[in-house]
Amino acid sequence: MTTIYFIRHGKTEWNLAARYQGAHGDSPLLEASHQDIRSLAASLAGVKFIHAYTSPLKRARQTAEELIAQLPTPVALTVDERLIEFDLGKMEGMTFSAVEKEWPTTVDNFHHHPERFDPTVVGSESFEEVIDRLKAAVLDYCHRYPRGNVLVVSHGAALNAGINGILGASLVNLKQRGGLSNTSTTVIQTTDQKHFELVKWNDTEYLHRTQVDPTDTV
């Protein structure tokens, strides 16, 4: 059995500012995110990982490196371009409110109706493209490691689309499970590299949040 632990990167300055980062934008992790990563590492201390993979973007790579450094057993880390964030085209760098004002229908479809999302309006990737590349990456990992635990550090929009696609959700139902929070853990398993089961979705209990911050989750 292969078990995949998906981690969304720690919260960044642009996350806090409700600004789209996408595949080309990037901003530093917040100071508080380093403690969040330590809390995440403590929650995973009992899991022995056979390998780890990360998006090349700095916010994900730094999260992966800090996380692995704090695990009790050394884990090799590979950068995989297929784990990069959803390319959001013209939306990247813009605030959520500015994007909603400029392309209200497009951004509503992006968040709530993926089956209606037209990527040509903003020059972005399509949901199908993101799902295909994330799924290809995960299948590669599962074939390489048919038994063991694999760690994957990536991004909110890409992981949300990719994981739900791997689990067989249609575009119409892609968002039914809700969003993924910064420094969250989502776990899936497979015994045959064809059928996947969801074990855990968007777990953040180890962060001990006392208040809900809407900028934490996409």
Image: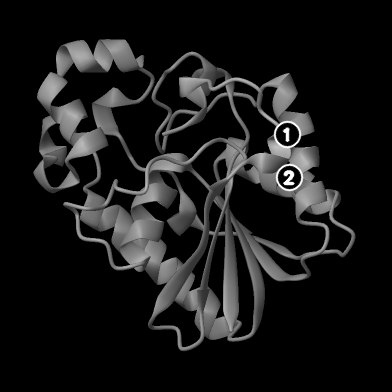
Residue at position x 77%, y 51% from top? 43
Could you tell me the amino acid type at mark 2?
A: Leu
Q: Residue at x 11, y 31 (%)?
A: 121
Observer-nearest residue: 218 or 19? Answer: 218
Instruction: Specify whether 196 is left or right of 2.
Output: left
- Going by the image, does 116 lie left or right of 205? left
CB under 8 Å between discs 1 and 2: yes
Q: Residues within 10 Å of mark 1 (few under 14, many from 20)?
A: many
Q: Which residue is mark 2?
A: 40
Secondary structure at badge 2 equals: helix
Residue 173: x %, y % from top left: 22, 53
Reading the image, the residue beneath label 1 is 36
Distance between mark 1 and mark 2 Cα atoms:
6 Å
Give above or below for 11 relative to 65.
Answer: above
Indicate the quadrant where residue 147 lies.
Answer: bottom right
- Image coordinates for residue 164, horizontal then vertical, percent: 35, 58
Specify whether 39 is left or right of 201: right
Tell me residue 63's x, y (percent): 68, 42
Residue 114 picture quarter: top left
Quarter of the image with the N terminus is: bottom right
The image quarter containing residue 119 is: top left
Residue 161 is tagged as none
User: Which residue is painted at 40% across and 59% down in the image?
Assistant: 163
Q: Please, is residue 97 above or below residue 53 in the view? A: above
Report crowding for label 2: few under 14, some 14 to 19, many 20 or more residues within 10 A (C-alpha).
many
Q: Tell me the kind of residue under disc 1.
A: Asp
